[in-house]
Image (cartoon, coloured by chain):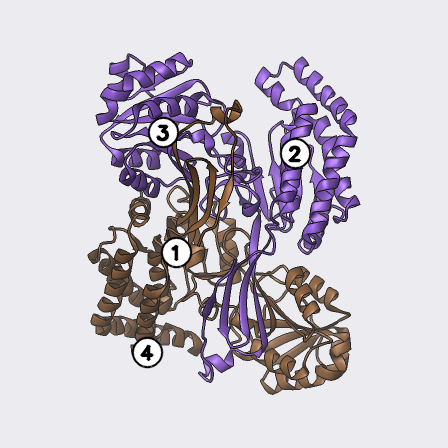
Chain colours: A brown, B purple
Amino acid sequence: MSDLTLQAAEAKRASRRLAIIDSDTKNSALANIALRLKENAEKIFDANDLDIKEAETSGLETPLLKRLKFREAKLSDVCDGINSLITLEDPVGKMSLHTTLDDGLELYRVSCPIGVVGVIFESRPDALVQIATLCLKSGNAVFLKGGREAKNTNKILADIISSAGIEAGLPEGWLHLLTTREDVTAMLALNEYIDLIIPRGSNEFVKYIMNNTSIAVLGHADGVCHTYIDRDCDPDIAVKVAVDAKTQYVSVCNATETFLIDRQAVPKVLDSLAEALKASGVELYGCPEASRLLSIPEVEEWHHEYLDYKASIKIVEDVNEAVDHINKYGSGHTDAIITQNEETADYFMSAVDSGSVLVNCSTRFADGFRYGFGAEVGISTSKIHARGPVGLEGMVSYKYKLIGHGDIVDDYSAKRKTFKHIRREVK
Amino acid sequence: MSDLTLQAAEAKRASRRLAIIDSDTKNSALANIALRLKENAEKIFDANDLDIKEAETSGLETPLLKRLKFREAKLSDVCDGINSLITLEDPVGKMSLHTTLDDGLELYRVSCPIGVVGVIFESRPDALVQIATLCLKSGNAVFLKGGREAKNTNKILADIISSAGIEAGLPEGWLHLLTTREDVTAMLALNEYIDLIIPRGSNEFVKYIMNNTSIAVLGHADGVCHTYIDRDCDPDIAVKVAVDAKTQYVSVCNATETFLIDRQAVPKVLDSLAEALKASGVELYGCPEASRLLSIPEVEEWHHEYLDYKASIKIVEDVNEAVDHINKYGSGHTDAIITQNEETADYFMSAVDSGSVLVNCSTRFADGFRYGFGAEVGISTSKIHARGPVGLEGMVSYKYKLIGHGDIVDDYSAKRKTFKHIRREVK
């Protein structure tokens, strides 16, 4: 067996033990991880300095350098994050169904960890800490592969987190760090050991992962998000929200890429919207009509993620055309409507087939931290398993537990007994 | 575009409409389906007679002929099933999370249909009715492919169900019947339109599907189920349950294939268990020790699904060895423990990594109907999305709905506002 296969087999064994570890042990491990991270702060910063120097030499862009940098402020943030994770309810062992099948035959559905999870993420050392601790709290063993620019920082963080966990009672092999692209490729074949892969990164990369493994994949390729401005909108809200949705952080998946404007809202909102976006530095592209009205170039492709100070504008006949456009050209990620009309809002939210649908607020809210999940391991555009921002609750599966007293199926097949199926309330 | 692609595109459009159809319309459609099935009983029986004649000519085995036969009793059963489905709560539109992110910024997580589901199933016409109506109730458009032996019966059932649904207000194209194996292969490539595939059938067939599509697959390949007899068992319960678990219906996935016996239970249970199983016609195979004690052949492969009047017996040191054996050689489907010791039972249920874990009852209980789900579309051994028997609740996804009043992320990034994240109770 290859080294990676041996590691995967070890992670699988560790996952069996993690599944039966109590909440207190997991929380002590989290506390010990925060402690050991702080104690080793200088070593971590030294490793990060190495990464930063290499990145500067190779000419990494400033926003990426900023994400790569891991100093006091970020260490303090991730330790705060760990402490808030400790206070969150254990997602494992929660009952979601209880049915009395018959006298003395009780069925329960109880949450349990998924098993072994592989997460591939960008060059952000704080992401490593967040993902590792989310996996720990949800009882999953984890394979981590971070961006290569952060390799020195990732190495020391993974070492500290892994051993601090083991010191507090977690099984050996609960966390493994992968360091090469070849390891990622090899991991895609280990469906015997790995239960779920969560890729974060570029569109092409996520598609590559999805098409090259039979392991379940949770994530999203692109984020072509829309904000639809309805005839019954408050124009001030429309402009304010649109600017935030486009410009608050342009290089992220939940930034709006396309504005759809109800034809009847054009007189009251089109000019002020275009002005406000231009004033924030946004270049606009339009449908033929918007292009003519605003003197802007025409859009070439509606399913397009700019990830930049650029946006598309389309004038639509009504909310139906907006919904159809979103379902056709969107990526099922996050889409918003601006309207004061509750009925229109309800229709939009039901008919748009996306992980997050929003009314009168910015698409940028679609995020695990803002949704109150503590942190997220990713955002899923799949409709299977977890959808939208994925926090602790998305990292568990469940099992059915049936407790009887010698019950046999033949009694029911032969009609000597009949099922009662009494659904009990669960908290 | 091929005919199948056109059908898939039509199903996708239908799924968008199904997603916003109210419960009353879905229930009227179900009632109309039951009505039209009864009205067309003679035509259905005639079609079934054709299938039965062909099957007899080609020498189909009696148990399979029995499953293929669709006459008054089965028609009445499926109509009863439809009526009970009508009384079940709509799984769509149920809220599972409500958080106040801040004043006037409310987050909801609400269930919604998956979209378009492809189900491939055995030559059992009643399965077609059950699957089609489960998909309808959960708001999913569906592609059905039944066993070829039932082709005439499937054709007329699908026609009646599809048109009875449309008559009651469902969109055109909500149900499609596939008739050839080539259609199934072609369907595996339609990831743009089909959200989930549920294959039922042989081990090899399910594995083939899983390895040949990037669409999510829900199901199970094999069912190597275990019953572990603990030192603290009641021997009468052990024998009674073991016989049911093995012999109540041998050719199904939840029948027990391997009995694990705690060494300390051997004196009180081994002989009577072996006798009872032999008396029911079961051939036994054992580990070296059991082989010697019972004069039976040795087991060749522990991960083996007999689907027959055959079973393996292994003597283990304790519950730990039993758990390890199950996690190593089982298929994560259904496993039971026979014990009067609650602590041992709890440990077994937490540590065994299977969809259903049972105490003092037969593995044959692991089934959607017996669990009270009305019916099942299949049993899943995946830990992603739905696990165990999959009924209505497994056929939905969810989306997040966020309702604000002009809220922008920049207010929170710039610390002018802070999230409150108040978790509200949901029913």
Q: Which residue is mark 4?
A: A73
Q: Is residue B410 above or below residue B304?
A: below
- Check disc 1 and give the amino acid type: Pro
The numbered disc on residue B199 is none
Position of residue B330 measured from the top left corner of the image (x, y, whole percent): 38, 33
Q: CA distance from mark 3 to mark 1?
A: 29 Å
Q: Which residue is mark 2?
A: B80
Q: Which residue is mark 1?
A: A91
* Residue depicted at x 48% and y 55%: A218
Q: Quadrant of residue B323?
A: top left
Mark 2 crowdedness (10 Å alpha carbons): few <14, some 14-19, many ≥20: few
* Residue depicted at x 71% and y 80%: A296
Position of residue A21 measured from the top left corner of the image (x, y, whole percent): 28, 51
| Disc 3: host chain | B
Q: CA distance from mark 3 to mark 4?
A: 54 Å
Tell me: B112 left or right of A144: right
Q: Is residue B156 above or below residue B56?
A: below
| Disc 2: host chain | B
Q: Which residue is mark 3?
A: B227
Tell me: A287 left or right of B239: right
| Disc 4: host chain | A
Say whether disc 4 or disc 1 marks the residue closer to the N-terminus: 4
Report if the CB atoms under discs 3 and 2 are less than 8 Å apart: no
